[in-house]
Amino acid sequence: MLITNIKGLVGLHPKDKLVLRGEEMNNLPVLENAWLLIEDDFIKDFGTMNDIPSQISSLPTQISAEGKFVFPSWCDSHTHIVFAASREEEFAMKIQGKTYEEIAAAGGGILNSASKMQIATEDQLYRSASIRLKQMILQGTGAVEIKSGYGLTVESEIKMLRVIKKLKANFPIPIKATFLAAHAFPSEYKNNQQAYIDLIIKEMLPQITAEKLADYIDVFCEKGFFSVEQTDQILKAGAKYNLKPKIHANQLSISGAVEIGIKNNAISVDHLEETNEETVFALKNSSTIATLLPSCSFYLGISFADAKSLIAANVAVALATDYNPGSTPSGNMNFVVSLGCIKLKMLPEQAINSATLNGAAAMEISGTYGSIANGKKANLFITKPMPSIAYLPYSFGETQIETIILNGKIYNG
C-alpha cells in the first residue's frame, strides 16, 4: 500500500526513541507533502513527494491523502473495558453532588460492577467488550491495555482475564492484560482485609500464571481502598510471578502510592490527579511513566493532573482513557487528547506524543508502535482534510479520523 500526497506525516521519531521525557515531548516531527509505503504489516519507507522513487510511484494500491494528515495510532495504556453492565444509575447521583466515596458507600462503584460481573458469562462479557473495542479502534486506537478488577472473586477475576485473552487472540491490535483484583475489598472481607489479600496472592496469582493470563499487576492504592503497605505486599507477590506493576496512584489524595510504585519498579503510575513537589521529585528521579487520565477528572468533576509540572521535571507523561462504566464511560482517545490540551494545558505536540509513543512505552511496545519509523508496525490513521495538527484537539467532539489502517490493511470494523 502506498499513501501519497500526505499533507503532514506525523510523529517521525527515530525507531530507537522508546520514550519521550520533559522537553522532548515538545518535539513532534512532521514531514510535509509526504508519501508512505507499507509492505506486509510494516512501514517500509517514506519521504517527500518531490523525491518519490519511480519504481513505487506506480504501485496499484494507492491512497491519496491530499490535504490530510497521517498519524500513528493512539496507544491507550489504561482501560477497564471488560464489564458486565453500564452504571448510568449512578449518573444522577453524581449530578446531585454525591462523591466517589459516597456512591461506593451506597452500594455503587466498583462493588456494583463486581456483583453484575459475577453473574455474567464469558460469552456475554466477550460480546460486549468486543463492541467497545471495535468502537475504540474506529476512533483511532491501535493498541490497548485492559484490566480485570470487577470480579473480586477467584472465579470472576479469572473469567475477566480469559475474556481479555480471547480479545487478544481475535483483534488485530496489541492488547496487554493487567490483573487488578486489588481494586476494592469485597464486602465479605471488609473486616478481614488480609484474608482477601491472601486470596489474591495464594489462589489467584498461581492460577493466572499457570494460564498465562496477565502481563501486569495493578493495585488501587488509595484511602478507603488499599493502603501503601498492602500495595507493597501485593506488588512484591506479583513480582515473584514476573508481573510488573502498573498502579492506580493519587487519584483522590496524596497517598504515598506513587512512591511505593516507584519502589517496586512500576512501568507506570496512573491517575495522579493529586500531586505535590515530593511526588513530582520522586517521578523525576525514576524511569516510571506518569499516565494521566483527564476524561476521568472531567466526568467525576475532580482535580485535573498537573501535567505541566511533570513535564517541566523531565517526567515521561502518557495519556489514556480509563474507559470504565463508573468514572469514564468513554474510550475516545481524541477527546482525551483534547482534554490534555484544554484542561491539562499541554501543547498539542505534547498531548499527541503522550497518546502515541509514550502510551506505547507504558505498555512496553514502543519499539514497534507509537511513531512513524521504518520497520514499525503500520498501525495508522488518516484524518479528514485539516488545516493543521492542532486542529485535531481543537475540534473536540467532532471526529477528524477518516481511515483506519491496522497491520498495513484498511480496517472497517
Image: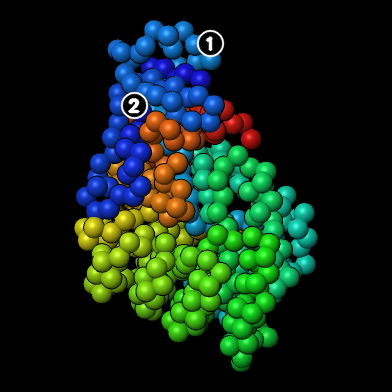
Q: Nearer the viewer, residue 407 or 85?
A: 407
**Residue shown at 41%/72% (left/top)?**
264
Q: Of the residues under marks 2 and 1, which one precedes in the sequence?
A: 2
Q: What's the mark number on residue 39?
A: none
Residue at the (59%, 82%) spot, across then down: 197
317 relative to 14, above or below: below
Choose top left, top right, bottom left or bottom right for residue 258.
bottom left
The secondary element bearing badge 1 is classed as: loop
Q: Is residue 84 left or right of residue 250?
A: right
Q: Position of residue 111 (x, y in %)?
A: 64, 74
Question: Given the image, on which type of amino acid does mark 2 rest?
Answer: Gly
Residue 134 in sight in this render: yes
- Which residue corresponds to mark 2? 8
Q: Measure the alpha-carbon separation of dots 2 and 1.
A: 22 Å
Q: Position of residue 99 (x, y in %)?
A: 49, 74
Q: How is the image coloured?
A: rainbow
Left or right, 388 with reference to 401: left
Q: Position of residue 165 (x, y in %)?
A: 66, 54
